[in-house]
Image (cartoon, grey):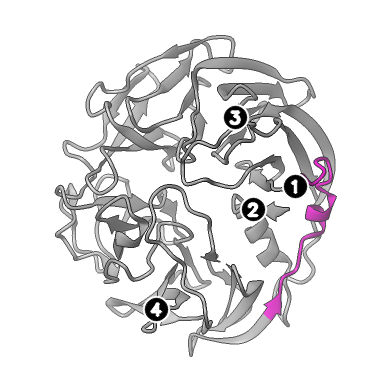
Amino acid sequence: MKRSTINYLTQVLLLSLLFSGRVLAQQPELRVVGTLPVAKVWAGHPVGFQLLTTERFQYACYYDSSRTLVVAQRPLSSKTWKTTKLPTQVGWDSHNSIKIAVDKRGFIHISGNMHNVPLIYFRSTKPESIEAFAKLPMTGQHEERVTYPVFFKDAAGDLYFQYRSGGSGKGITFWNKYHADTQQWQGVFDTPFFDGEEEASAYMTNPALGPDGYFYIVWMWRATPTASTNHNLSCIRSKDLKRWENQRGDAMTLPIKWRDNRAVVDPVGPWNGLINMGYKVSWNSQKVPYISYHKYDARGISQVYLARWEGDQWKPYQLSRWEGFTWDLNRNGSLSNDVGISSVEAAGEGVLAVAYHHQQHGKGTWLVNENTMTIQEQLPEKVPAYLQQLTALPPREGMIEHRLPDNTGRYLLQWQTLPTNQDRPRPEPYPAPSELVLYELSK
């Protein structure tokens, strides 16, 4: 049975357990200390669920066996789930993930099941209660064709919502901020955040707070729904999520437009292997930013790269030297993740650890010399011990296994589905529902 790429926690833990000289060798390994069934869920295609843990409660959002969006809640002291069904059902689109957040006053916010459709957003009527939800607009503007909902918080804990209005290739990105005292959403900017000027739409990371006190966003532009038209890897930063600048400190005028190239990291052209999967920003021990991504080399072979800020410019470095595989991106819809690279992690003085996966060359970790930006050692894949303890779900023929961590790294959801079908319906019979299982992890 194949493993899902919904596996950020595994990547982070893998890096923390590797060793070579000074790498983090003596860290105690995580282990499974508890297992709890959640529900039976739809298994006909992969789509994003979410698991959120607060000080008192845990929330799981998923599509049940009837494809209905469900939110489940339990006190952390209890093994009993309460559930509420929300009035929306998923079709066949793997873009239609579910997002959940809890604001400063404890009200629960849920959005999801959207790909270029009117906004679907619910807020609980009482704090920390899933008994009743109201389906609401946010600002009431630019909410007719919504995709890619994201909740996130700033350093003060205020809640934000990001989404795209419009289709791939002609989408515009908006940010809203929630005012908990008035329970009102308001646009963060007087303009959109990103505007592709009818030529492209931006595909971006969530804001990542760096050790230098800046929030970073990495993005690329896409000209059409076809994945191969991604181009121009770019990066901006901000101290307050309002005023944005490029890495040189030049102020960026909002909305950030497709024709403005001042924040470009690597001017990758369309049809050159850039894809909005697996790109991220991270930092070394000296707070220097690195951007991980993949594209084609001069021969058209898929390779992974690190771009590093040096002096007053971004400098890309090719890490891999693979042969014989070109990831075909000339397709629409949800794609399998054939090549990937992790963020960087300090692994001793002047050494970075970077994990990778490849459809043909497998998985492993490279130790990268920061002076030469070359691989000085390749380590085989080391499977964390706790992964071998995820035994609640027996393998099912033709199914892939998904593992989804919560926001604390102490809990993990596991379930199974058929692989992606590029968002197209499958003929009946459909697979039997999968068990959705929660694991608790501890050192």
Q: Is residue 162 left or right of residue 399?
A: left
Mark 3 or mark 2, which has the lower sequence index?
Answer: 2
Q: In the rendering, at what x and y percent does residue 104 appear? A: 48, 26
Towards the viewer: 428 or 108: 428
Q: Look at label 4 and name its amino acid.
A: Gly
SS category of the residue bearing label 4: loop
| Magenta portion: prevailing SS class | loop
Mark 4 or mark 3, which has the lower sequence index?
Answer: 3
Q: Is residue 19 left or right of residue 332?
A: right
Mark 3 lies on residue: 62
Q: Look at label 2 and name its amino acid.
A: Leu
Q: Is residue 168 left or right of residue 205?
A: left
Which residue: 80% across, 59% down? 29
Mark 2 lies on residue: 9
Q: Are marks 2 and 1 in contact (CB under 8 Å)?
A: no
Q: In the rendering, at what x and y percent does residue 129 appear? A: 59, 14
Mark 2 or mark 1, which has the lower sequence index?
Answer: 2
SS category of the residue bearing label 2: helix
**Which residues, given as a range, are shown in magenta?**
379-396
Mark 1 or mark 3, which has the lower sequence index?
Answer: 3
Towards the viewer: 152 or 87: 87
Q: In the rendering, at what x and y percent does residue 334 appear? A: 46, 48
Q: Are marks 4 and 3 in contact (CB under 8 Å)?
A: no
Query: Which label number is shown at residue 193?
Result: none
Mark 4 lies on residue: 300
Mark 3 to mark 2 CA distance (whole Å):
19 Å
Q: Look at label 3 and name its amino acid.
A: Tyr
Mark 2 crowd level (few <14, some 14–19, many ≥20, 10 Å Cα): some
Q: Look at label 1 and name its amino acid.
A: Glu
Mark 4 or mark 2, which has the lower sequence index?
Answer: 2
